[in-house]
Amino acid sequence: MTSQDHKMGIETLDAEKQNAAHEEYSAEVLDKKGNGDYSGAVAKSDPEEIKLVKKLDKWIMPTLWLMYWLNYLDRNAITLARLNGFEEDLNLQGSQYNTSVSILFVGYVLGQIPSNMIITRVRPSFYMGGFMMAWAVVSSLTAVANNYTGALLTRFFLGIVEAPYYPGALYMLSTFYTRKELATRISILYSGNVLASAFAGLIAAGVFEGMDGLAGIKGWRWLFILQGAVTFVVAIVACFTLPDEPLTTRWLTPEQRQLAHDRVLRDTVGQKGDGNPWSGLREAIIDPKVWVFIVLQHLHLATNGFKNFFPTIVNTLGFNTTITLVITCPPFLIAGALSILWAKSSGHFNESTWHITISKIVATFGFVLACSTMNVGARYFAMCVFTIGTYGVNSILLAWVGNTCGQTREKKASALALANVSATLSLIWTPYLWPKSDAPRLAYEVDASQTEQEDKADRFRGYVILCLLDMLLVNWVVKD
């Protein structure tokens, strides 16, 4: 052995000793916070960790929330454009509008898994910010569509460039927050989706009332242009405010970076160290629990498919366009607030099964009520109820995926992407459950033929069955 080799061997041994000593020190620091609970999650009591989490919340959550808010506004502008002549201007016939809605999710599915395999090997801040710029441009291009083909192309490519955002955001949160913290943060993030649904109608009402015909451009076209412009500006800011990983976050002190890394490492179940993207995907695919979560997400988002047609559903109450757009807001505001409280309760008690099950029961009651009466007040109340029930599930379920399938960074990213792909697949076929011919009841009509009544009642029974299957699978996951 040469002196050079001997020196390198000593340095390697010293590095290993330093790492071991650091891990022992980290364990001692974290153990001072308490013995944790049955799930292994560690409770916070250390002032430095509390200060760290507040700093993470200050930097990460507002940026991700605003990105998601704009993500959903841009994606669902088409549902509002429908109320301002979108179908007529593009001469859409039959189910062509429904196809224009669903084609986005084909692109979304194609982009999600490859994206989350890539995100572990690049800088997430620039990666997500860059794709946000891309979707801002593609969304704005919808304003120049003049026919069915133009609508299909812009929607398909919008799905591809939007695909990296949500699974990427979930991955980012899971690398900075512990299991006890994650469900609440995902719920806060998801409230961006909920509040976008709430305020999208108000924004559209203002644009349609104030800009329809301005410079010879229809209001729905202005909606795509304005929202795309705002999205592009926010994307530039996001590139510099989002972190990449705990040990390289520029707005944390060196001590905070190490603590941020250590606490998540200690909190991860069955940590195996890092692998590569393909091994992470393989580990996720062969894990039976991942497949249960895949089915759960598909069933859940299938029952949540009404959100892409909510303005159309509210329009069946018989109000004019402006009032319809305004009253789409309250159900989502209520659902957003309650979903955050519900996720916080789930994190506090470290319990997911009954939180998801109760939410599904509430959603089922709302669907039953909406389909069993033509009273305007009762139907609007039902819309609030099933919105609350369906939005109470998502953050808890996705936190569950990240918490139990995170043995490696790559497996966690792949598991989250697979769950989201499964959810997105449901959004490809659910738009066809809401044809115009079913208004005003959107379930069954009293004066329809017996065959039509049975067909539409079967669809409603399908929603109830989906909720029940979700409940059964949730309980099976716990017993597994």
Image (cartoon, rainbow, N blue to C red):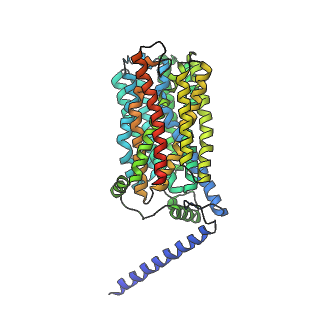
Label count reads: 0
Q: In the rendered view, tell whether residue 415 sits above or below residue 452.
A: below
In the visual, does 213 lie left or right of 452?
right
Quadrant into which the N terminus falls: bottom left
**Front in this rendered view, residue 480 or 157:** 480
**Front in this rendered view, residue 35 or 243:** 35
Residue 163 seen from this side: no
Which residue is outermost to the top?
Answer: 447
Q: In the rendered view, tell whether residue 284 sits above or below residue 304.
A: below
In the visual, does 111 lie left or right of 256?
left
Q: Where is residue 360 in the image (x, y as percent from the top left)?
A: 53, 38
Q: Where is residue 133 in the image (x, y as percent from the top left)?
A: 45, 40
Residue appearing at x 42%, y 21% in the figure: 454
Residue 370 seen from this side: yes
Q: In the rendered view, tell whether residue 411 sits above or below residue 107.
A: below
Q: Position of residue 428 (x, y in %)?
A: 38, 33
Which residue is outermost to the front?
Answer: 450
Residue appearing at x 42%, y 78% in the figure: 12
Residue 32 location, quadrant: bottom right
Residue 365 location, quadrant: top right
Residue appearing at x 37%, y 40% in the figure: 109
Quadrant into which the C terminus falls: bottom left
